[in-house]
């Protein structure tokens, strides 16, 4: 029986208070805040972060397949699996599949995991609602990841799953649309309620379960109210309904149900029964039973920790610039050249995988790869060495107010890794007054820039934070 072996999540550091949207337009706004991807983040970079959280203390060579689900790919025509696999240090022979377009892509990818394989499922979304619209306030950004497989390490057995198809045009985005469009919410809510009432109870009866035996129900509906309406109609108590993350994250597209499932697993106990209900032109239903192995799973950041690590001082104008919704005066610098495809191909393992070299003779680590050791001068005595996951400290830094950056000043630092090695790189998710010599940092996968339709990814440093306000 397939089940979940591990989980992970990622919520962007930046949060936009919804009241700031209302203040900008002089209109009423919803309460709470929503998570927004930084100017250097997209669905791919967020997917890497969630997967790294999921694979903590695990051997990437044991991954047989990787599935990526998103409705907001940086490309309309180009796969993201090779980028993800290289950044995560997976085998080149790993099987890959991408699911897109549907807001059920995340749950569909979980159900598609093949028995007998260790499948890494990543769901990430970074959608944009039109200014002044309801979607702008509802939508948030985030990602979740699961390792699906079998054996004694399964923390939640997948008892059963099924799908229901039902055409309804509630949310859509054409090839030329920047913003997600939506019909009046009563249409999607009525279709959702009908499908839920007709499908959930028979599904539970088929598996000898009832409403009362479900510990947590994870409902991802079309609106912020629909999940509660569905839960009440089915007879679930408020204690059984999983927090939908509306108040502090938002509707995260196809990653919404997976992120709620991560949140439920963080609090689950052996024997708990979890029901997932994911809506989008139909339903995906998943029934899981938590096992004793969940007590042996190591600590993950997950939803709980990432929710508390935030910068809620983001201005609405920052959001508009980062999303390129408004045009601003370009920097007085030459335009960024399109990255060279041959150069990207030659260096993709080094740059995406953050792989340098380590001297076999004296153990000195260097990035980028070198033939000659800087310490002992040994020649051609190098082996590949991955810097991701190592702790590091800021040795020195500069604040560059003249560099072209959507969030000036650009912070550039010399980073020394605790296990050896040094790199000069950007520091992200960090206030200029916060950076200091000796600050502990970790590496995070980010999009450096996009030019000529090509996204260029690399690694940046970010402060290691443990809790809110630190």
Image (tube, helix red, strand yellow):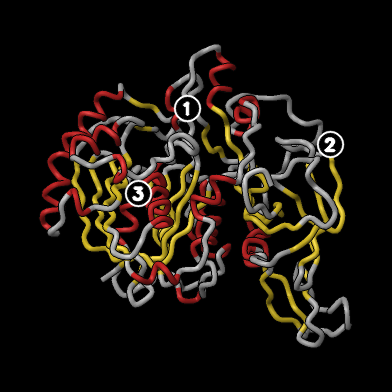
Res 420 visible: yes
Classify 24 as above or below 204.
above
Percent from the top left, x then y, of residue 178?
48, 30
Label 2 SS:
loop
Residue at x-position 77% and y-position 85%: 381
Q: Which of the marked residues, 2 or 1, is nearer the chain's N terminus?
A: 1
3 vs 1, front mark: 1
Neighbour tally class for label 1: few under 14, some 14-19, many 20 plus, Cα within 10 Å: many
Percent from the top left, x then y, of residue 361?
80, 88
2 vs 1, front mark: 1
Classify 414 as above or below 429.
below
**Distance (Cα) linking label 3 and label 1:** 22 Å
Label 1 SS:
helix
Which dot marks residue 186? none
Q: Is residue 460 left or right of residue 177?
A: right
Residue at x-position 49% and y-position 32%: 128
Q: Which of the marked residues, 2 or 3, is nearer the chain's N terminus?
A: 3
* Residue marked by disc 3: 105
Question: Would you say the residues marked 2 and 3 are in contact, meaning their CB atoms lie under 8 Å apart?
Answer: no
Q: Which of the marked residues, 3 or 1, is nearer the chain's N terminus?
A: 3
Residue at x-position 11% and y-position 54%: 205
Label 3 SS:
helix
Neighbour tally class for label 2: few under 14, some 14-19, many 20 plus, Cα within 10 Å: few
* Residue marked by disc 2: 401
Numbered marks: total: 3
* Residue marked by disc 1: 137
Neighbour tally class for label 3: few under 14, some 14-19, many 20 plus, Cα within 10 Å: many
């Amino acid at each position: 029986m397939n089940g979940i072996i591990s989980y992970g999540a990622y919520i962007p550091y930046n949060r936009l208070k919804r009241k700031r949207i209302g203040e900008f337009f002089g209109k009423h706004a919803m309460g709470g805040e929503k998570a927004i991807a930084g100017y250097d983040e997209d669905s791919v970079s967020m997917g890497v972060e969630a997967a790294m959280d999921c694979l903590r203390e695990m051997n990437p060579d044991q991954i047989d397949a990787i599935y990526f689900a998103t409705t907001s790919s940086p490309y309309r025509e180009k796969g993201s699996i090779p980028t993800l696999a290289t950044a995560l240090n997976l085998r080149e022979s790993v099987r890959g599949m991408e699911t897109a377009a549907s807001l059920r892509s995340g749950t569909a990818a979980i159900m598609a995991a093949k028995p007998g394989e260790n499948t890494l499922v990543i769901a990430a979304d970074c959608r944009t609602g039109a200014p002044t619209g309801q979607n702008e306030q509802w939508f948030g950004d985030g990602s979740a990841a699961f390792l699906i497989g079998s054996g004694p390490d399964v923390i939640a057995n997948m008892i059963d799953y099924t799908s229901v198809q039902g055409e309804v045009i509630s949310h859509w985005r054409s090839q030329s649309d920047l913003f997600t469009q939506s019909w009046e919410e009563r249409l999607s809510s009525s279709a959702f309620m009908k499908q839920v009432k007709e499908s959930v109870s028979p599904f539970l009866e088929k598996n000898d379960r009832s409403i009362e035996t479900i510990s947590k129900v994870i409902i991802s509906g079309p609106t912020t109210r629909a999940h509660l309406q569905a839960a009440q109609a089915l007879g679930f108590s408020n204690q059984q309904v999983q927090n939908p993350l509306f108040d502090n994250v938002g509707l995260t597209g196809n990653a919404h149900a997976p992120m709620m499932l991560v949140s439920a697993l963080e609090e689950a106990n052996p024997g708990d029964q979890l029901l997932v209900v994911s809506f989008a032109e139909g339903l995906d239903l998943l029934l899981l039973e938590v096992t004793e192995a969940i007590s042996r799973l190591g600590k993950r950041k997950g939803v709980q920790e990432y929710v508390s690590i935030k910068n809620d001082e983001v201005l609405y104008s920052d959001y508009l610039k980062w999303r390129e919704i408004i045009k601003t005066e370009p920097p007085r610098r030459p335009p960024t050249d399109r990255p060279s495809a041959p150069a990207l191909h030659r260096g993709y393992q080094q740059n995406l995988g953050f792989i340098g070299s380590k001297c076999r003779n004296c153990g000195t680590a260097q990035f980028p790869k070198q033939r000659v050791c800087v310490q002992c001068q040994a020649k051609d005595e190098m082996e590949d060495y991955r810097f991701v996951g190592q702790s590091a400290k800021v040795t020195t830094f500069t604040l560059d107010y003249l560099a072209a950056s959507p969030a000036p000043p650009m912070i550039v630092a010399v980073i020394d890794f605790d296990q050896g090695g040094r790199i000069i790189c950007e520091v992200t998710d960090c206030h200029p007054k916060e950076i200091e010599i000796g600050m502990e940092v970790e590496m995070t996968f980010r999009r450096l820039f996009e030019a000529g339709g090509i996204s260029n990814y690399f690694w940046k440093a970010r402060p290691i934070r443990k809790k809110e306000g630190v």
